[in-house]
Image (tube, rainbow, N blue to C red):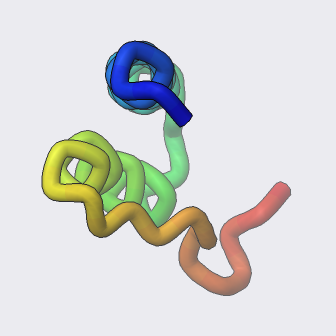
Amino acid sequence: MPDRYDTFLHNENIKNFEAKIRVETDPVRLAWLHDMPAQEMAGTLVKKPPMGTLK
């Protein structure tokens, strides 16, 4: 994938995580979501939420 698409997706992922943080009420999921932008920026994103937290 060309760099411009990688950059676009990277920025969109961060925006989406920040939007989810604003509305999440589950403390376990919220803690997981707080790590997502940092992992995205570092390129080490793990896409699975903590076990037992999916609604």
Is residue 52 depicted above or below 32 in this figure? below
In the picture, the quarter occupied by the N terminus is top right
Is residue 38 depicted above or below 49 in this figure? above
- Which residue is at the front of the view, 46 or 26? 46
Q: Residue furthest front?
A: 2
Residue 26 relative to residue 3: left or right: right
- Which residue is at the front of the view, 11 or 19? 11
Residue 4 relative to residue 42: left or right: right
**Residue in the picture at 77% in, 63% down:** 54
Question: To which quarter of the image does residue 27 belong?
Answer: bottom left
Residue 7 relative to residue 49: left or right: left
**Residue in the picture at 46% in, 70% down:** 46
Residue 33 placement (x, y as % from top left): 39, 49
**Residue in the picture at 15% in, 56% down:** 42
**Residue in the picture at 42% in, 29% down:** 6
Residue 51 relative to residue 1: left or right: right
Q: Residue furthest bottom?
A: 51
